[in-house]
Amino acid sequence: MTKINLLDWRAQRREQIKQRFIAMMGVAVAVAAVIFGATYLMMKNAIDLQNDRNEYLKQQIAEVDQKIKEIQELEKVKNNLLARMRVIEELQASRNATVHFFDELVNTLPEGVTLTSIKQAANQVTLEGAAESNGRVSTYMKNLEASAWFDDPKLVVIKTSETGSTRRSNFTLQVTNLTKATTGPVPADNGEIVE
């Protein structure tokens, strides 16, 4: 006996194509989900890795900042020590200068002149004393002018008084002290300038 298929073959074929299409769509959705999931995981791993790097950099920056603070503190200590060393050097130099100052005062003092007062403000020295005559005061001023340690002597006051047969001149002089004015070369004992 002959069998005849009375079903619509076109509808059956459409149903097969539709099922294939649904199956392909399912596969495409699954592949897209796998690709999306893999991409998401890769991006998450990259972000986590970058966050770890950022944290490491922050830690390193904090350590470097701490070291910079320590270096700045050491610089302050170094500058303080250098300032103290300069003060000590200046004190050492001024100690010698004070000795030279008084030594030169004695060396420039002519016979017949005595000093009664010495006052210093900055590098200006005021000398008060007595002399046997005005000429001795003039000689003293010339000696101060010729000295390498003093400069620009000025006579402020001179008073002459006589007691019996004794004549006396009381004077006040101002002179510039070069031991205070000079910071570089200073005069040597022989009067020459040395470095």
Image: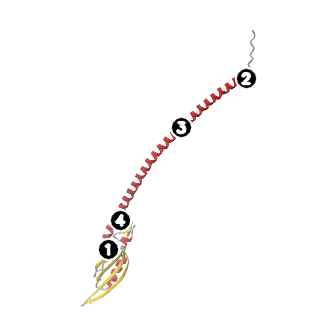
Q: Are marks 3 and 1 in contact (CB under 8 Å)?
A: no
Amino acid at the residue labelled 4: Glu
Give the CA distance from mark 2 to mark 1: 134 Å
Q: Which residue is mark 1?
A: 104
Q: Earlier in the sequence, mark 1 or mark 4?
A: 4
At numbered mark 2, what does the secondary structure look like: helix, strand or loop? helix
Give the CA distance from mark 3 to mark 2: 48 Å
Location of residue 133 with respect to 94 vertically, above or below:
below
Identify the coloring.
secondary structure
Q: Are marks 2 and 1 in contact (CB under 8 Å)?
A: no
Left or right of residue 43, residue 147 in this image: left
Location of residue 75 with respect to 7 vertically, above or below:
below
Amino acid at the residue labelled 3: Lys
Q: Nearer the viewer, mark 4 or mark 2?
A: 2
Q: Which residue is mark 3?
A: 44
Q: Quadrant for residue 176, please give it.
A: bottom left
Q: Nearer the viewer, mark 3 or mark 1?
A: 3
Q: Earlier in the sequence, mark 3 or mark 1?
A: 3
Q: Which residue is mark 2?
A: 11
